[in-house]
């Protein structure tokens, strides 16, 4: 494995907008990625295996619930810091960032926001430390972009709930200790409930043969008459607002994470263009290659400005779901385009594991679809600016 020489790219001196603490945490995570992720990620991706030993390290750098209050085991950090952590982890690999995003925004966030005090005390400290891992059950075989059509359901049996149904494309499912599952109750209202591994009738078959997110563990959640204690119901939320608010937090993290993947592709392409010689000179000296590189850093810079401003709005509790959708859609599409252009600059070498380009490109093909597809986010923006609902 060649040395990880990534240094970061800040064409508009964005660091001047960050606090010393934000920069320190970002640099700490960057150093961890260089030491723990980069040297091993290609081999794990080739084997389609999740590097589970990284979980403790992710916890130690504060990647699990960084914005959760310290009294529950979190770091109590602001939203920009959370974004920077996701950026640096995805610079290493989208699948590793997915593990952290799910744990933070889709498991810890709903328990903190909608759970009882007993649930917060029971689960959050263990989730923050990595002693317990979680997953998020919303998507179903016939319910993706339209989560309101889910058929997974809970029936009130008096002293417990009876859970039936199935969820799919669930990150962390194969090894998760708990699942935050969204299901319809007897009245047809969507409720969140915490399902624990070991409950009879609850299984998590792993999804194999993926071309994308190969270093991430993906699976299904299958519920066959699972008895869930009533105290596991999230008491403070009802309806789609619950899962969608979780997705807003996760999508925000993705908007930052995609910048990390884009920067890694750009960094590799820039360095390769200065080292690779053809016709007696570095290929970076040719106009077409400079065009590619100039457009890459321009789009990265625009995305950095977009997410920084969104982070300010999140810190002020003013960011709208539509603003988050715009950033997620723009930045993931930007990263995909940069990965494709970077692959061309690398020529044939770009398809090999010696460089990170194809791994990022394949990973981003999942990121552009999950947690709201590219087209769905486009329609969210369209509805926001016109007031017309194109979903119905």
Image: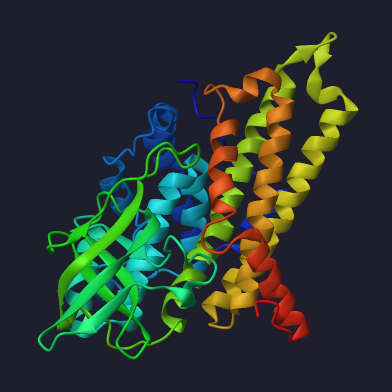
Residue in the image at 17% along x and 60% along y: 197
Q: Is residue 266 rendered to the left or right of residue 89? A: right
Q: How is the image coloured?
A: rainbow
Percent position (x, y) of residue 185? 31, 84
Q: Quadrant of residue 113?
A: bottom left
Say which quarter of the image contains residue 266: top right
Q: In the depicted view, which residue is nearer to us: 158 or 137?
A: 158
**Residue 66: in sight, yes or no?**
no
Image quadrant in which the N terminus is located: top left
Q: Pick whichever, 12 or 67, lies toward us.
A: 67
Residue 75 x %, y % = 34, 66
Q: Is residue 385 above or below residue 265?
A: below
In the picture, measured across the screen, residue 130 lies left or right of residue 149, that is left
Q: Is residue 211 above or below residue 282?
A: below
Most extreme residue toward the top, as rendered? 280
In the image, farthest residue toward the left: 159
Residue at 52%, 76% in the rendered image: 315
Q: Position of residue 90 (x, y in %)?
A: 50, 47
Q: Residue furthest right?
A: 287
- Image position of 333 (left or right of 312): right
Q: How many marks?
A: 0
* Residue 14 coordinates in the image, percent (x, y): 66, 57
């Amino acid at each position: 494995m060649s040395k990880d020489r990534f240094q970061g790219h800040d064409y508009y001196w964005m660091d001047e907008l960050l606090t010393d603490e934000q920069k320190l945490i970002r640099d700490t995570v960057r150093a961890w990625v260089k030491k723990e992720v980069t040297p091993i990620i290609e081999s794990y991706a080739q084997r389609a295996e999740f590097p589970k030993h990284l979980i403790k390290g992710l916890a130690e750098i504060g990647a699990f619930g960084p914005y959760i209050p310290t009294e529950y085991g979190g770091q109590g950090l602001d939203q920009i810091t959370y974004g920077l952590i996701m950026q640096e982890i995805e610079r290493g690999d989208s699948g590793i960032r997915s593990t952290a995003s799910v744990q933070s925004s889709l498991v810890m966030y709903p328990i903190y926001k909608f759970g009882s005090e007993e649930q917060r005390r029971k689960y959050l400290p263990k989730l923050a430390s990595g002693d317990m891992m979680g997953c998020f059950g919303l998507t179903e075989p016939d319910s993706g972009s339209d989560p309101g059509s889910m058929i997974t359901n809970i029936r009130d049996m008096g002293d417990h709930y009876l859970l039936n149904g199935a969820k799919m494309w669930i990150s962390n499912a194969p090894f998760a200790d708990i699942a935050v599952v969204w299901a319809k109750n007897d009245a047809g209202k969507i409720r969140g409930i915490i399902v624990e591994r070991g409950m009879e009738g609850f299984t998590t078959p792993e999804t194999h043969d993926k071309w994308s997110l190969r270093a991430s563990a993906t699976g299904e959640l299958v519920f066959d008459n699972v008895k869930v204690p009533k105290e596991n119901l999230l008491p403070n939320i009802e309806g789609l607002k619950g899962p969608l608010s979780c997705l807003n937090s996760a999508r925000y993290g993705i908007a930052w994470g995609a910048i990390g993947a884009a920067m890694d592709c750009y960094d590799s392409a820039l360095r390769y263009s200065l080292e690779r010689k053809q016709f007696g000179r570095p290929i970076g000296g040719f106009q077409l290659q400079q065009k590619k590189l100039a457009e890459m850093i321009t789009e990265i810079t625009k995305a950095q400005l977009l997410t920084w401003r969104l982070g300010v709005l999140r810190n002020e509790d003013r960011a709208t779901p539509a603003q988050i959708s715009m950033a997620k859609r723009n930045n993931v599409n930007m990263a995909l385009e940069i990965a494709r252009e970077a692959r061309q600059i690398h020529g044939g070498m770009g398809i090999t594991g010696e460089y990170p380009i194809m791994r990022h490109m394949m990973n981003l093909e999942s990121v552009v679809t999950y947690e709201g597809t590219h087209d769905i986010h486009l329609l969210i923006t369209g509805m926001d600016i016109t007031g017309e609902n194109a979903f119905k």
